[in-house]
Amino acid sequence: DLDRQQKELLAAASQALSERKKEIEENMNLAETLL
């Protein structure tokens, strides 16, 4: 049903977001070590 589909989409989106956030934090750490 639609409600379940929306919840799955939301879960996938927040999963992707947290992974992206992790990547950004790693890049920031890398940048700091290079400075």
Image: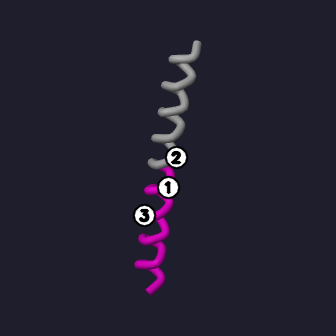
Q: Nearer the viewer, residue 33 or 28?
A: 33
Give the position of the C terminus as an image quadrant.
Answer: top right
Relative side of 12 to 35, left or right: left
Q: Residue 30, how many percent across, how many down?
A: 52, 25
Q: Residue at x 42, y 63 (%)?
A: 11
Label 1 close to label 3 by CB (< 8 Å) = no
Q: Residue at x 43, y 78 (%)?
A: 3
Q: Main secondary structure of the magenta part?
A: helix
State the extent of the magenta-drawn residues as a range.
Answer: 1-17
Query: Which amino acid type is marked by label 2?
Result: Arg
Q: Given the current orientation, which residue lies at the most extreme bottom position? A: 1
Residue 11: assigned label: 3
Please check the rendered image and state whether residue 7 is part of the magenta-colored stretch, yes or no.
yes
Please check the rendered image and state whether residue 14 is part of the magenta-colored stretch, yes or no.
yes
Question: Label 2's element?
Answer: helix
Q: Nearer the viewer, mark 1 or mark 3?
A: 1
Above or below — where is 35 with respect to 30? above
* Residue at the spot of label 2: 20
Residue 2: assigned label: none
Question: Label 1's element?
Answer: helix
**Gap between marks 2 and 3 measured at Cα:** 14 Å
* Residue at the spot of label 1: 16
